[in-house]
Image (cartoon, grey):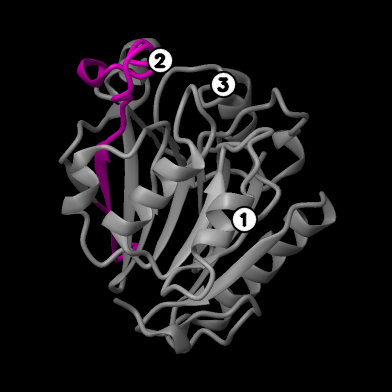
Amino acid sequence: MILASLFTVACMANKTSNNGDMEKNADILKNFSSEGYAFDSFTSPKGRQIDLIFIKHGSIALLVDGFLIYVDPVTIYGNDFSRLPGADLILVTHEHHDHFDVKAIEELQRESDKIIGSKRIGELYSSASVMLPGEKTEIPNQDFSIEAVPAYNITEGHLQFHPKERKDIGFIFDIDGLRIYVAGDTEDIPEMADLKDIDIAFLPVNQPYTMTPQQALNAVKMIKPRILYPYHYGETDLTPLVDALKGSETEVRVRQLQ
């Protein structure tokens, strides 16, 4: 687990990146800020700056040394991705319209981009590479990895939303040992107990489609993240989750991710 002193919401100096990367990071973040999107910054154990950008609902972005990754970009919440920096990589957890949006993907595409998604995304979007739960990929020339993990429903009456057999996924980013878990649409599935050394977790809190606050609390107890970002939460009252984790080893940060 990365020590608490490594975490900060202020932009920090990048010890290993060159000036070009730092300037590129700053320019990209300025673009997001000008469009009204907030971000938190962290430093990896090797001194690399990592920025988490909060877009809306299940849409977030990660910026590592000028390398920009979008997760589940969609336009249905008023996001105009044509006004945002182009993607180096686009990740899609599953096929639902609030996670998979061809218009958003096309607005973010540039020559260097790549799209990785679940099995169904590969069937629906021919240029997407597929990752199955349990698979891991190294990002070329970036010195970090992405692992696909299961995401599905377990509550009776909700199984049809995200059936296990469809092989929807979440993602774990491992950047110099700092591990960020973006869960996708899931409940508190037993596989979460196998996730190790998660520093930052994005967990969906929006039943009947994902988790109740109590399920999210159970997920936190399994994952033990240093920082929790509830996301995909719609009109869910997060107060019970926030109150239950006060004074615990997990810091809850609520951002505009309804």
User: Which of the 4 image quarters holds residue 120?
Assistant: top left
Q: Mark 2 — residue? A: 161
Q: Work out whether 105 lies above or below 3.
A: above
Residue count near mark 1 (Cα–Cα under 10 Å), binned few <14, some 14–19, many ≥20: many
- Residue 53 place in picture, x, y as percent: 62, 55
Q: Residue at x 58, y 72 (%)?
A: 41
Q: Amino acid at mark 3?
A: Asp
154 magenta-colored: yes
- Residue 44 place in picture, x, y as percent: 40, 78
Q: Residue at x 37, y 68 (%)?
A: 199
Q: Which residues are magenta?
A: 138-166
Q: Work out whether 250 lies above or below 201.
A: below
Residue 215 visible to the viewer: yes
Residue count near mark 2 (Cα–Cα under 10 Å), binned few <14, some 14–19, many ≥20: some
- Residue 236 place in picture, x, y as percent: 63, 36
C-beta proximity under 8 Å, tags 2 and 1: no
Q: Mark 1 — residue? A: 53
Q: Mark 3 — residue? A: 101
Give the quadrant of the N terminus.
Answer: bottom left
Q: Amino acid at mark 1?
A: Ile
C-beta proximity under 8 Å, tags 3 and 1: no
